[in-house]
Image: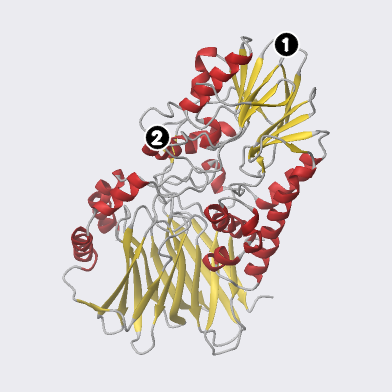
Amino acid sequence: MPLTMAEVAPGVFMRRGVDEDVSVANDDAIANIGFIVGREAVAVTDAGGSLNDGRRLHASIRRVTQLPIRYVLMSHVHPDHVFGAGAFSADHPTYVGHAALPGALAARWEYYRVRTEAILGRDSVGPMVTPTMLVKDRAQIDLGGRIVELTAHGTAHTDCDLSAFDRRSATLIAADLLFVRRAPSLDGSLKGWLKELTLLKSIPAKRAVPGHGPTSVNWPDGSQDLERYLGVLLRETRAAIKKGVEIDAAAKTVGLSERSRWLLFDDYNGHNVLQAFKELEWE
Amino acid sequence: MGVTRSLLAALMMGSLAALAPPRAHGGDDSAAIMQQHAAEDAAERAARWKSLQQAVFGARQMQDGSGVIQIDAPEHALDAALVPVTLTVKPGTPVKGVYLVIDNNPSPVAGHFTFGPRADPRVLKMRVRVNQYTFIHAVAEASDGRLYVSQQFVKTSGGCSAPVGPDNSQALQDVGLMKLHLLGPFQAGKPVQAQLMIRHPNFNGMQMDLITRAYTPARFIRTIDASYDGAAVFHLDSDISLSTDPVITFGFVPDKRGTMSLIVRDSDNALFNHSFDVPAG
């Protein structure tokens, strides 16, 4: 059963992930995933949160085109973006990731797999898929008259974030460097994320595809909520550290002015504060 | 401690099979996992503590610690790999040491503080990993040798196998770096709280590297010695349960302006020394 895809720009198809955490009911189809169709080939970005999620994406691609699936982009290490990768192995695509992704996958795949399969059942994830095309700084892939620019970012949402820019449609596939409406999750560096957002805003994109939230937002306007949230997190965590507030007490008080603006806020904000605190207390 | 530690690790290995809740992004407990945790009933938990008590303290009697030592930890911790624990020693009973025991961790004795003449033992704080739902016990050893115990239940899990960072190999970059700051004003002769931060991954040997198909070898802080102008503040025997980049808050009584010296030794026998002026600057 194929997914419901939105064609956010000509030849760019995205599936809206649900604003939930992984569950049996959602098969970990919680991230925005999709594909870009060129004249000669297809690039997947991302593959989805489980083998089933990936298989459905595969079926959705085949409803649109029979062109070969030549690339599968892996935007970062989190399971909701990479656990569908194995569903494309029969196509023998080039798996593409940040240069730091293989190490991150090696450290985390098993940890995430055990936890995801505890919920979704055995073989819902499959063996680790490692990218073979590694991006250190910038790279391009050509889908046939359609160049997609890839950027390996400094530590931000995670330490292995890869964004993709489709020149022809001026569409930025930001993946989890951009959260809209769903509470962001910080697993890299708060200061680094703000820095990479500034860089992303300079990309001449008309629209961006967030990793979570609507499948398309105007760019760079669509970054405002995330920047504001990260700014609040930075200022208030720093202030808490300066005042000598304990890390657990800070997790209960920092960022609360943002509470009504984000879905799943209570599930993520406290943890984000812990991450920010650990980073900023060494300043 | 060495024998005790490996004995206890062997005893507890069975408990590792229990699964932890997902933290795909942040995540919540799933129903299946909640049931697994509930399966260990009160009697089993009591039996576990009894056998631990036997292994660590032998036949020594233990008394109710409610008037002597208080243990505070979040009942539902946000991050199983970073659970803040506060141990408060109440006035009235002089203590010479404090143990923190995390019953269901693979190596349950998380830390044993022994206080020196410059210590103010009233408040100790640290951050620990919690592998699964567990009782944590604080045992105070009074100056007369009596033992007093308090306990709290903590609902969180997965902290021991949680990856240290996205890439474990980067975790050793700044190893041994330390910071110390006073949490109150310096006054000669008056007790003051200090926070010690140490860069150390505290690898517990349970973080998997899938490329090498091996677990990152354990490398963790074994001892910390703090002294002020040569007089001991505390000695800590610690273990794999301390969080990555340990942060420890402790009290001491500086008789005058002086120097706080820290000696940290890890399981690879690496030695890290730092001295800090008190007050700073």
User: Counting residues from the N terminus, which is met first, the one under dot 2 or under dot 1?
Assistant: 1
Identify the mark at residue A39; answer none if there is no mark.
Answer: 1
For label 1, the crowd category at 10 Å Cα-Cα, with few meaning under 14, some 14 to 19 and many 20 or more, is: few
Residue contact between numbered discs 2 and 1, judged by CB atoms under 8 Å? no
Q: Tag 1, which chain?
A: A
Q: CA distance from mark 2 to mark 1?
A: 37 Å
The three-letter amino acid code for the residue at tag 1 is Arg
Residue A182's place in the image compared with A125, above or below, is: below
Of A252 and A279, nearer the camera is A252
Q: Residue at x 42, y 37 (%)?
A: A116
The three-letter amino acid code for the residue at tag 2 is Leu
Residue B261 percent location from the top left of the image = 54, 71
**Quarter of the view holding residue B214:** top left
Residue B255 percent location from the top left of the image = 54, 88
Identify the mark at residue A131; answer none if there is no mark.
Answer: none
Q: Residue at x 48, y 57 (%)?
A: B78
Instruction: Assign the C terminus of chain A to one quadrant of the image.
Output: bottom right
